[in-house]
Amino acid sequence: MIGRWCILLCLLLSVIACKDSSSGNHAEQSPYRSNASDTNPHFDLPDIQQNGELIVLTLYGPESYFDFRGEDFGVQFMIARQYAKSIGVSIRVDVSRNQRDLIQKLQKGEGDFIAFQVDRADSLSSLLDYVGEKELFTFMDSLSLQRKDTSLRPRAHAAWAVRKDSPLLSASLSQWMTAHQKDFFDYTTIKIKSSSGRTYVPRRKVASPILNAARGQISQYDDLFKKYAIQCKWDWRLMAAQAYQESAFDPQAVSYMGAMGLMQLMPGTARDVGVSQSEVFVPERNVQGASKLINQLNTHYAFISNADERLNFILAAYNAGPGHVDDARALAKKYGKNPNVWLGNVDAFVLKMSDSQYYNQPEVKYGYFRGGETYDYVNSIRARWNEYKKKIRN
């Protein structure tokens, strides 16, 4: 009797082993599946809410996620952030270098969903739920036309992705996107609320770059530029040239990225230089904060001994953030250029930082940014400063 049970037990174990082997071979047919996915915990909606954090997987890019002066942006990230708020949790971003890595991380349980328009593929239909294809396409298409920005154009047959074993999260996200599609423009438009309750939306008044050349007056804020340029050891006309580039001398200006005031301080930057939310639209406090930021950047690039050369890096970092400029320096060094010289060296790689071929390289820590804008920013301020020096006495 015991012998019969042993034989039956051996046969049963053999069948189980064959099934396991068969399912393992099937899994290996997909380039996106990882064996580690079978051992890592897969959170569904209740687990995420209990944990208090939503982990979003994405790629760098203008439509998905990027850093600007220390703040997080990207229209799809901003939509995902609103969803996180709706379920009562914080959001954390995990950035990959390509779509394959995104899907593998999702399968391993390293993130909860992909907030990037993943190209739909039949080979992945058994692994992923696709969410928001119609809603995202409609919104991104309208946004690219509204902003006249072709980099925001949507891809056909692409959507966010959730694991099959997170059905409650998939259903919640899908229902939320359908119900809130009309709010996507609102979610991705920066609004600044002052302590008095006033709401500032993107705005910039156009002003003359020189108020009265005959009287030597660039703007009505010249006294502030003269006062605070001394503190950062700048020519006051250079600070005036920068202010015109930033806000066209509009102290109430707000950019689409949320930069505020005469010198366009970002909320985080304003806090770092001691300018409160209630003060950021006060011209003197804004200019004073900008002077402190310029001093910080001057210290950051103190290793560039030539002051005029260093100025290029300070201006570029004021516009894009030092992390992005240092990424361009790292690429310049990698490709045999001088990382401490702007013209014909680092500026060439600043221009490449909106190209995924470059911003996805391992030397790049901060990913995508609009390098063309930074390049023009430096050149425009320097050109205007030269004009001011010719027309306005120091």
Image (cartoon, rainbow, N blue to C red):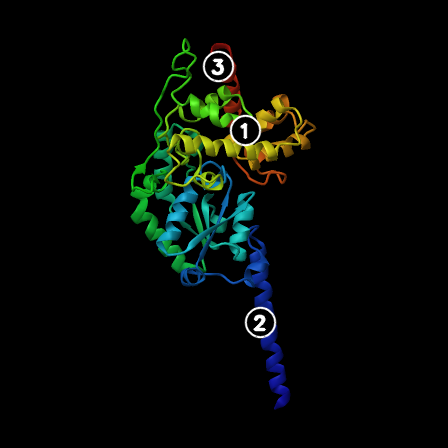
Q: Residues within 10 Å of mark 1 (few under 14, many from 20)?
A: some
**49 versus 358 height, above or below:** below
> Percent x, y for residue 198?
29, 39
Q: Is residue 88 left or right of residue 238?
A: left
> Percent x, y for residue 274?
46, 40
Q: Which residue is mark 2?
A: 16
Q: As shown in the figure, which amino acid type bears the numbered disc 2?
A: Ile
- Mark 3 against mark 2, which lies toward the viewer? 3
Front one among 275 and 134: 275
Q: Secondary structure at mark 2?
A: helix
Q: Earlier in the sequence, mark 3 or mark 2?
A: 2
Q: Is residue 38 left or right of residue 133?
A: right
Q: Secondary structure at mark 3?
A: helix
The residue positioned 58% from the left and 76% from the top of the image is 12
Q: Which residue is mark 1?
A: 232
Q: Residues within 10 Å of mark 2 (few under 14, many from 20)?
A: few
Q: In the picture, which quadrant includes the N terminus?
A: bottom right
